[in-house]
Amino acid sequence: MPAGADVVHVDMDAFFASVEVLDHPELVGRPVLVGGTGPRGVVAACTYEARRFGVRSAMPMSLARRACPGAVVLPGRFGRYAEVSERLHRILLDVTPMVERIALDEAFLDVSGAHRLFGDSRTIAHVLRSRVVDELGLPCSVGVGPAKLVAKLASEAAKPTATRDGVVPGPGVVVVEPVGVRPFLDPLPVGALWGVGPVAGRRLAAVGVVTVGDLAALPEATVVRLLGRSVGGSLARLARGEGDRRVVPSRPHKSVGQERTFPVDEVDPARLHLHLVGLVDGAAHHLRSAGLAGRTVTLKVRFAGFTTSTRSHTLDQPVDTASAILAVAADLLESVDVTPGVRLLGVSVSGVAPVTAGGGTGQLAFDMGDSPGGPGAASGGGGPGGAAGSPGPGGWSQISAVVDAVRSRYGRSSLGPAALVGPAPGPGAPGAPDSRAR
């Protein structure tokens, strides 16, 4: 457990939007929104130029476009963001194995064991930020503190600020030493603490608690009476800067998958199959990027009435290619009555484990029991998107390796399933899904 300010929080600035600007330099300095463009779309990320107009992540896209009518709106490319995220985390792991991945764009590090090689925590923070900028071409903010919450809030203090007059650069790195924790925390709004939601905020405001310092000044017994033993005790400790210091290295993924919410409820089985092709392709790519393969394929279908159905099948051997996953997922989809209208479609692969060097992955034994003609018939011949003719055992693994190599050099969108090539078939056209790794 670190004794000083040895917890580092690295947080990418406007990550999805920054990647889009990196890939499209003509957008530098312009307001950019990334997210869904349909009537149900929300903002996944936005540049600071867009934040000047009050746009925020999770805002309905329709409201964001009204607030910032000159914004460039782009669909998300989650495969591309995952590729950049892997490069980011390799940089972090160069400093210490004690890396706790929080999301694609942020992580905690315990650098207490890295001082001999890299210097003190402040030096490490500046080195990390410089490497991210130099090697990825992307901005990030870094916070350092004696506890995870303090480091997280320090990274927020290091970020740029969007004002009506323009974007004000942040310091980039903020370090909070143990003796400076209370002076740093006390002026912050109490909502900055983990666990203070709307209900807790109203209860605290009713007794005059507005800042973290106000909360820290209350006896812990009073906070417990207001909010309950578990929440109250935790918040009282956080307000005093006594939060959990321990950085837990990231656990292996339990599942990898993708899902997509449609702007218009989908009822056409053929169009749903096309969406499934894209989702499976993305999930398989993420599996291989992480060096994983899995045995259980799960299909998730959410209907117009918000009821959700999930169906799974477990294979005898682990798989990591789109053709193998699609063979199972397509059969699962055929067994679902989609006439009520599908609001969301998702596919995931669980039971994952690292692929052994030189061992490859199994792609056979897909007997689902009650599917006429087997999964090959359901998926149109074994190939991604229903291409006729299978390359045979091991063939799809070799093809997938070539696809990954091309995408690594030219980008995630440079190569994809042939079934998705052509004009967009309307409002529910296959697009950028939401990528999930658990």
Image: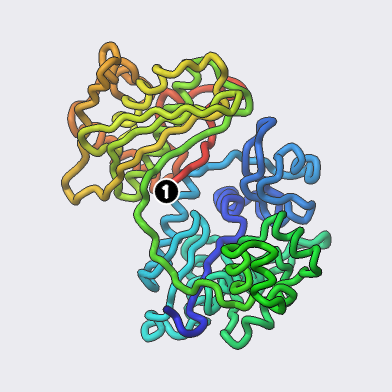
Where's the N terminus, which quadrant?
Answer: bottom left
- Which quadrant holds residue 333? top left
Q: x, y percentage for residue 234?
A: 58, 68
Where is 421 relative to 124, above or below?
above
Name the residue at 75% across, 71% down.
211
Q: To which residue does mark 1 refer? A: 438
Q: Amino acid at mark 1?
A: Arg
- Depth check: 289 or 303 in front? 303
Where is 266 relative to 2, above or below?
above
Q: x, y percentage for residue 389?
A: 26, 19
Q: x, y percentage for residue 99?
A: 41, 66
Where is 159 relative to 335, above or below?
below
Which colour assignment does the render follow?
Answer: rainbow
From the viewer's perspective, is 233 left or right of 85? right
Name the residue at 70% across, 59% down.
200
Q: x, y percentage for residue 146?
A: 53, 79
- Which quadrant holds residue 155? bottom right
Q: Residues within 10 Å of mark 1 (few under 14, many from 20)?
A: few
Q: Is residue 228 visible?
A: yes
Name the residue at 56% across, 72% down.
151
